[in-house]
């Protein structure tokens, strides 16, 4: 299953990329949502092949996930891979400058089930595809507005 979204942000590509790769802030945001995050890298940012381990509750059960940075081409693209049980994920975030102060952000999220239980989970997501797409696009729009608000505060 694949979920995609595109959003235009009123900020420079460098600013948008720095916000997307502000891993400390993203970790804190995940922790506020009840996700336990552990770094599997030293330093401020992960290198290729490094990442995080996370524990979270989903559908009444504790789950574990490993997230790794698979590719990074600053300031144009960043790609993450994830594994949780029999489900593998891939997230690609691409940035395209539309003007000096406007950037298009495209996100593509893929889920690839490797076990029967993961296939059943993905099938239930497919049944709710329209609701998932709406929520995904709404969250992208909110994140874009948050980035724009940070530009205003800095300027």
Image (cartoon, rainbow, N blue to C red):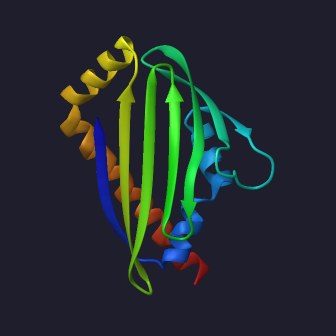
Q: Would residue 50 appear left or right of 43 to someone viewing this image?
A: left
Instruction: Tell me where residue 46 appears, x and y as whole percent.
Output: 69, 51
Residue 52 percent across, percent down from the top left: 65, 38
**5 lies left or right of 30:** left
Q: Is residue 24 above or below residue 112?
A: below
Q: Is residue 13 left or right of residue 139?
A: right
Q: Residue at x 55, y 76 (%)?
A: 14
Identified at 48% across, 69% down, the residue is 76
- Pick out the residue farthest to the bottom: 100
Q: Determine whether 116 is above or below 48 in the image.
A: above
Depth check, front residue: 75 or 36: 75
Q: Residue at x 68, y 44 (%)?
A: 50
Q: Quadrant of residue 75?
A: bottom right
Across the whole image, how many numbered discs are drawn on residues? Answer: 0
The N terminus appears in which quarter of the rendering? top left
Give the image quarter of residue 117.
top left
Quadrant location of the C terminus? bottom right
Give the vertical position of 14 relative to 146 (above or below). Answer: below
- Seen as rendered, the residue at the extreme right is 42
Residue 128 pos. (x, y %): 22, 30
Q: Is residue 155 above or below residue 71?
A: below
Q: Residue 40, how many percent across, how many down?
A: 73, 38
Q: Which residue appears at 64% of the width and 53% of the height?
A: 23
Question: In front here: 33 or 101?
Answer: 101
């Amino acid at each position: 299953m694949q979920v995609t979204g595109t959003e235009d942000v009123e900020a420079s590509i460098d600013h948008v990329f720095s916000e997307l790769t502000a891993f400390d802030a993203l970790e804190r945001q995940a922790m506020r949502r009840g996700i336990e995050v552990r770094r599997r890298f030293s330093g401020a940012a992960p290198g290729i092949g490094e990442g995080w381990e996370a524990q979270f509750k989903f559908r009444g059960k504790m789950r574990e996930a490993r997230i790794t940075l698979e590719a990074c081409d600053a300031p144009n693209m960043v790609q993450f891979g994830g594994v949780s049980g029999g489900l593998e994920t891939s997230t690609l975030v691409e940035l395209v400058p539309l003007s000096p102060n406007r950037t298009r952000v495209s996100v593509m999220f893929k889920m690839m089930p490797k076990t029967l239980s993961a296939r059943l989970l993905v099938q239930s997501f497919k049944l709710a595809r329209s609701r998932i797409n709406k929520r995904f696009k709404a969250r992208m729009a909110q994140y874009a507005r948050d980035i724009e608000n940070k530009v205003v505060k800095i300027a």
